[in-house]
Amino acid sequence: MRTTTAALAAALLIVSLTACGSTDNADAKATSSETPTPAATTNSPEAEPTPTHQPILKLGTTWEFESTEDSGDNIAGTVTVLDYKQGVRSIVSADEDSGTDGYEWAYVELKTCSTSGSFLASVEPWTISYEDGTRVESSSTTYDDFPKPEYPVETQLTTGKCVRGKLVFAVPGDSWPQNVVYAPYGLDAPQEWAVPTEG
């Protein structure tokens, strides 16, 4: 049974986390917080509001972040959603595990790395979102035949170290998710990766 850690090691150290964009996709760069505000002029159209969300990335795109801890230490890392697969088999059905008919197993393959400093990588911030607003959390139970390697419940990462694995979810079998969502405590706007259309 998985348990939630209260500390989440400085909530995956993202107290004032700053997105640095993508290393794999130039279109995935995060909006700068220092974007100049256009000066108001007479009879000019209103300026568009600054986006309050991160750009949605493609699977396989790496998102970079950096943060400063209370101690003044700089921490930086990368997070990547590598793959999504639905219809995974297990000795225990997703129906049985979730207590709801029509569910099946799915996994998200993830990779988290520290490029500077030490922080905790955890399953806690990850969910799957659907177009109707539904959010699904990862399974609180793990079975021996779940896809390997499994993404660890929590891992302390130090500079130059990574963790990679598959995180399993019980999902509605008649629906296809829209995004994989990463929303650690302290991050102003969640980072999302789009799940390609089924088939």
Image (tube, helix red, strand yellow):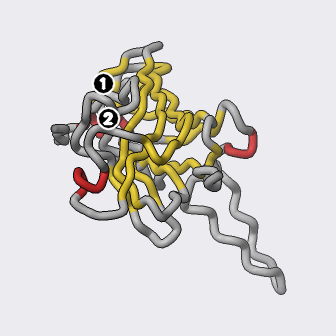
Q: Amino acid at mark 1?
A: Thr
Front position in the image: 98 or 163: 98
Front position in the image: 34 or 78: 78
Q: Classify residue 131 as left or right of residue 107.
A: right
Q: Classify residue 86 as left or right of residue 27.
A: left
Single out the residue that lies furthest toward the right: 43
Q: Earlier in the sequence, mark 2 or mark 1?
A: 2
Q: Is residue 35 visible?
A: yes
Q: Which residue is mark 1?
A: 155
Question: Could you say where residue 49 lies in the image, as x and y percent from the top left?
Answer: 64, 70
**Mark seen at residue 60:** none
Front position in the image: 137 or 38: 137
- Seen at 33% across and 39% down, the residue is 90
Q: Amino acid at mark 2?
A: Ser
**Mark seen at residue 122:** 2
Quadrant of res 26:
top right
- Quote the CA–CA distance across marks 2 and 1: 6 Å
- Seen at 40% across and 31% down, the residue is 147
The N terminus sits in image quarter: top left
Single out the residue that lies furthest toward the top: 160
Question: Could you say where residue 100 lies in the image, as x and y percent from the top left?
Answer: 27, 63
